[in-house]
């Protein structure tokens, strides 16, 4: 069997071409694809970005890196999330924010990641615009996680297509911004550990999976989460 290669597999190369060929912005930079529709004029209170970092396992399946947040954090403590955080003054755009945060949280060298697409932002209950950035990790073996224990207590990966399947999915109605909306939860187990992926992270992963794998979920998609009426973040 051939040893690890730093070059992308044929499937990942095709995936890269597909994403880069998606309708792009007028600036001719990376594509802005897969946006949830807006629902009302909601003003944004800030900007953040998360990295949807995907790679191919030895069996040829596409997987995504996920983290579990530290229980000591003030917000979303102990929850499963994507690497990411708030945009800082020195960040050129959402891509820079996502890559910087991933390096700070899990020690992921930005040089190992090829950013291929940027999704439209999702709005959190606190009014924060969160932009998902899709990146490809060509060779998983080159990434040796170094966790920032103040923020992250665990890292794992999951098959991307699970977020398009109904097998381990359940929904629960919760109050969100004064509205009763159905939240989706995905249950996942790896190395004897059980994880629950839900809320904004679950919604982002379902949308990202549909864009990356070019197919719709097997379940009825939930009502779109609102986005701000005027998005002025730097993509």
Image (cartoon, helix red, strand yellow):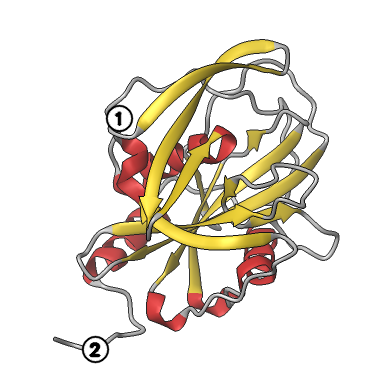
Q: Residue at x 48, y 41 (%)?
A: 196
Residue 13 circle label: none
To which residue does mark 2 refer?
Answer: 3
* Residue drawn 42% across the image and 59% down it: 157
Is residue 28 in view from this perspective?
A: no
Identify the residue at the far bottom of this view.
3
Rendering coords of residue 33 (x, y %): 48, 42
Q: Residues within 10 Å of mark 1 (few under 14, many from 20)?
A: few
Look at the numbered discs 2 and 1 and tell me whether their residues touch, using CB distance below 8 Å: no
Where does residue 85 sit, x and y in percent of width and height?
Answer: 71, 53
Q: Answer left or right for 155 relative to 151.
A: left
Q: Position of residue 198 (x, y in %)?
A: 52, 35
Query: Which of 174/13 is in front?
Result: 174
At 63% from the left edge and 23% from the top edge, which residue is drawn?
226
Q: Quadrant of the N terminus?
A: bottom left
SS class of the residue under badge 2? loop
Quadrant in which residue 218 is drawn? top left
Q: Which of the 4 quarters of the picture holds residue 165? A: top left
Q: In the picture shown, does residue 123 fall above or below 75?
A: above
Look at mark 1 in the image and give the residue it sits on: 166
Ranked by sequence position, the earlier of labels 2 and 1 is 2
| Residue 63, quarter of picture | bottom left
Q: As drawn, is 211 to the left or to the right of 155?
A: left
Residue nearer the viewer, 88 or 158: 158
At horizontal 63% and vertical 71% (from top left) the residue drawn is 147
């Amino acid at each position: 069997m051939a040893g690890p290669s730093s070059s992308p597999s044929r499937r990942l190369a095709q995936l890269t071409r597909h994403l880069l060929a998606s309708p792009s912005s007028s600036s001719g930079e990376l594509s802005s694809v897969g946006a949830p529709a807006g629902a009302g004029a909601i003003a944004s209170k800030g900007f953040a970005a998360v990295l949807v970092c995907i790679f191919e396992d030895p069996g040829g399946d596409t997987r995504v890196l996920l983290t579990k947040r530290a229980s000591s954090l003030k917000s979303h403590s102990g929850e499963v999330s994507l690497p990411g955080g708030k945009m800082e003054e020195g960040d050129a755009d959402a891509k820079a924010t996502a890559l910087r945060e991933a390096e700070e949280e899990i020690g992921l060298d930005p040089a190992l990641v090829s950013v291929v697409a940027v999704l439209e932002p999702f709005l959190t209950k606190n009014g924060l615009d969160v932009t998902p950035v899709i990146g490809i990790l060509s060779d998983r073996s080159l990434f040796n996680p170094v966790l920032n224990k103040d923020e992250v207590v665990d890292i794992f990966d999951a098959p991307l297509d699970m977020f398009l399947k109904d097998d381990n999915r359940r929904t629960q109605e919760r109050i969100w911004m004064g509205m009763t909306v159905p939240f989706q939860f995905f249950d996942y187990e790896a190395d004897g550990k059980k994880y629950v992926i839900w809320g904004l992270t679950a919604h982002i992963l379902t949308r990202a999976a549909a864009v990356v794998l070019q197919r719709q979920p097997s379940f009825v998609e939930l009502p779109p989460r609102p986005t701000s009426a005027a998005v002025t973040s730097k993509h």
